[in-house]
Amino acid sequence: MSNKEELIAKLVSEISAKVSERLAPNIPSSVVQDYKGLSPGISPVRAWFKYQAKLPMSSDEIKTLDALQWATDKISIPLNLTGQITRTDQTSNVIPTRIAEAFVEQLGGWNAIRDNCNLIQTSTGEKIRVPQVDDRSNIAAWLTSSGIDMTTSVPPTITGVTLDARTVSSKAIVIDNTLVRDSTIDLEGLLGRIIAERIGRFANNKATVGSGSNEPHGIVTASPSQQTAAQGTIAYDDLVGLIYSIEEPYRSSGKFMMNKSTIAHVCKIKDSQNRPLFISDPSGKPGGTILGFPIVENRDMADVGASAKPIIFGDMKVYAYREVSTLQLAILRERFIEFNSLGFLAFYDFDSAMLATSTTNAIKALQVKPS
């Protein structure tokens, strides 16, 4: 073995050990035992890519694919790494958790709604019905000797919202075959980050401003609103009014959501002595909270402008983000063969909707008064 080959082998061993150390707590011991015969240091996803690209494979890589039954164009990867990892009809989900790990780690950075709202993960894509309850008009009463007057009893208003599983495609992601062959590259981590950015950007946009027609009803679109006092701008009084338009206990769990431009706008609000009003960090760093409530940055919120809704405030948990906890990967073998590359598609299923009725005052959008 040459010095170069020895160095590569050493790097592969070190990377595999580090990845295994990170994944070990998330993989049930019973599942690990089922695959303890697999060769250490072998990347099943890399082996799968090599198989699809018809690149030379080692005997250990062939053995890995045979053991996992991965002679297929599509594999399934679980996103819920803390749950039980099981074998599906198509393939085993136990090994490629590095992709899911990188995907989930990065997705929050690109998808503020998923990271802060009520995340509902399901194993299948059937529609689910979630109840909406508004019982604010009813109140308890003393029990007297004459009993309870049932004629004045009013049933709670119970409606519901249906969460679908709408499929998002990453579009083709093209990987050069040299990357597939290079065992020093963390291919699974790279793919997870690319998929997370592409899908995260799209899903966050739809979950933020989706119209609700053949797409999710975005949190801004679904939130009732109140106007600012002045035209075309946001003042301190508008923020206080927005906070106290929310009912307790929703207000105590409240967060602000806005984009970076609006955060800057709010941080520039000054008093009559030209001193900034919002400096929450002891170091003087602005932008952490507004009047004690956290700020969530969401790139898909509107800028401050006439008739725009640049800020929402309230309990984000009343907005549901449903995802199917399996990421599908499919290979495009022939399309990019002239470029000595492999293409693959990732498929992600999600939907989102407001769980609170508009009359519960759980969350609201601040709308800038038009000029």
Image (cartoon, rainbow, N blue to C red):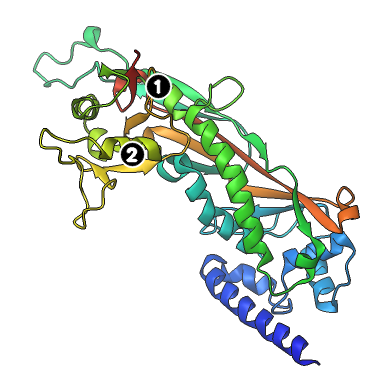
Is residue 7 in sight in this rendering?
A: yes
Q: How many marks?
A: 2
Quadrant in which the N terminus is drawn: bottom right
- Give percent across and percent down for residue 244: 20, 27
Where in the figure is residue 365, as x and y percent of width and height? 35, 25
- Note whether residue 228 is visible: no
Q: 329 or 112, which lies in front?
A: 112
Label 1 sits on residue: 308
Nearest to the observer: residue 148 or residue 137: 137
**Relative to 65, residue 72 above or below:** above
Specify the label residue 263 is tagged with.
2
**Mark 1 or mark 2: whose residue is earlier in sequence:** 2
Quarter-wise, where is residue 278 in the image?
top left
Q: Is residue 207 left or right of residue 331?
A: left
Q: Amino acid at mark 2?
A: Ile
Compared across the picture, whether 7 is left or right of 351 comes to: right
Q: Residue 72, how many percent across, how many down?
A: 83, 55
Q: Amino acid at mark 1?
A: Ala
Task: Tell me the quarter of the image containing the C terminus.
Answer: top left
- Which residue: 72% across, 42% down? 171
At 82% from the left and 55% from the top, the residue drawn is 342
Q: Is residue 113 above or below residue 49?
A: above
Across and down, in percent, residue 238 comes to: 23, 25
CB-based contact (under 8 Å), mark 1 and mark 2: no
Mark number, residue 74? none
Q: Secondary structure at mark 1?
A: loop
| Disc 1/disc 2 C-alpha distance (Å) | 15 Å
